[in-house]
Amino acid sequence: MRRRLLAGALTAAAAGVGFLGTRPDSDWYRALDKPAWQPPNVAFPLVWTPLYGLIGWGTGRALEKAAPDDRRLLALTTADLAANAGWCWVFFAKQSPATGLGVILALDVLNIALLREAAKHDTAATLALKPYVVWSGFATALNASIWWRNRR
């Protein structure tokens, strides 16, 4: 139970910190040239809310199944969620799609590592994390497109 609470707390912290750095209504963001396939702004909280729930549940379950040898999984979870929250700050607050692309590519690597580590311990946890990996891949393509369209 302690590991599930820890995973939930880490996930909630990442969601909160990321939320504070996200500014989709800023003049800067609204002025960016974005691809036609970008979802409307309202879609992002509708997608991220259940994803954060799945991340917290999946990592918590994997940590419980991995115990007592859960150090690698906990380190990956922490690094992954730090990159997740950090992306919001570098993309929106720093107003840098290029830096955001670097961070989200690192996040993709961490996501795959986290998924592979979770798969060593629990199938249900792995299934819970897969939508996060898929959505982050989509977000990477979106970030890359925004960077490409707005590079100077």
Image: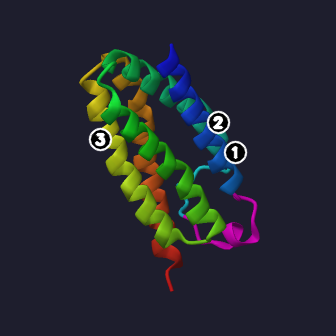
The amino acid beneath tag 3 is Ala
Residue 15 colored in magenta in the image = no
Q: CA distance from mark 3 to mark 2?
A: 26 Å
The residue type indicated by label 2 comes to: Leu
Residue at 55% x, 72% y is 96
- Image location of residue 142, percent across then percent down: 48, 58
> Which mark is first along the chain, 2 or 3?
2
Q: Nearer the viewer, residue 79 or 110?
A: 79
Separation of residues labelled 1 and 2 (CA atoms): 7 Å
Q: Against 23, is 12 above or below?
A: above
Q: Residues within 10 Å of mark 3 (few under 14, many from 20)?
A: some
Q: Position of residue 46 (x, y in %)?
A: 64, 36
- Residue type pointed to by label 1: Val
- According to the image, label 1 marks what residue? 42
Q: Earlier in the sequence, mark 1 or mark 3?
A: 1
Please, what is the dominant secondary structure of the magenta stretch? loop
Disc 2 packing (10 Å; few <14; some 14–19; many ≥20): few
Magenta stretch in the rendered image: 22-34
Q: Callout 1: helix, strand or loop?
A: loop
Residue under pointer 2: 46
The answer to whether mark 1 and mark 2 are in CB contact below 8 A is: yes
Q: Which residue is mark 3?
A: 113
Q: Is residue 134 above or below residue 149?
A: above
